[in-house]
Image (spheres, rainbow, N blue to C red):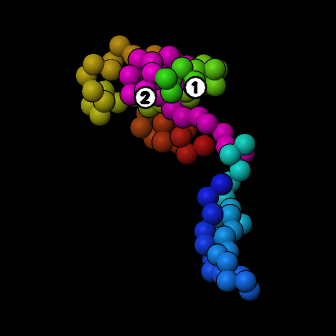
Amino acid sequence: QSSTVRLGVNENGEDYYVPVKDMLPMANPTDLVIGGWDISSLNLADAMERAEVLDYDLQRQLVPYMKEIKPMPSIYFPDFIAANQGSRADNVLKGSHRELLEHIRG
């Protein structure tokens, strides 16, 4: 949202810049809703810690925002998920393939 683009020069020969958000339709970051699906019911702060993907300092800064977010139940087909994930599958949808498809289509 804070990036600018040089459009050319003004009548004084000076570079003319405009914010990208004034040129392209962009969502306001305060309008974003963060969510997702996971076979594990851990809140996102605990899941982030378990995954060990993000830098520790970044995790520390994100915990207050992530600890209240819980994933929606997900579809769990063991044939398509690593074998070591079965014990974490405590947040899954139940039903036939067709029922599950209709559920996620909303």
Q: Quadrant of the N terminus?
A: bottom right
- The residue at 38%/22% (across/down) is 52
Q: Is residue 93 visible to us here?
A: no
Residue 65 quadrant: top right
Cβ atoms at labels 1 and 2 below 8 Å apart:
yes
- The residue at 68%/46% (across/down) is 29
Circle count:
2
Nearer to the camera, 21 or 66: 21
Q: CA distance from mark 1 to mark 2?
A: 10 Å
The type of residue carrying mark 2 is: Leu
Give the left or right position of residue 83, taking residue 105 as reference: left
Looking at the image, the residue that sits furthest to the bottom is 11
Label at residue 12: none
Q: Quadrant of the C terminus?
A: top right
Residue 78 x/y as whole percent: 30, 27
The range drawn in magenta is 31-56
Is 52 within the magenta? yes
Q: Is residue 50 above or below residue 2?
A: above
Mark 2 neighbour density, 10 Å: few (under 14) some (14–19) many (20 or more): few
Examine the residues drawn in magenta and state their main secondary structure: loop
Residue that badge 1 annotates? 62
Q: Is residue 17 above or below residue 70?
A: below
Label at residue 54: 2
The type of residue carrying mark 1 is: Leu
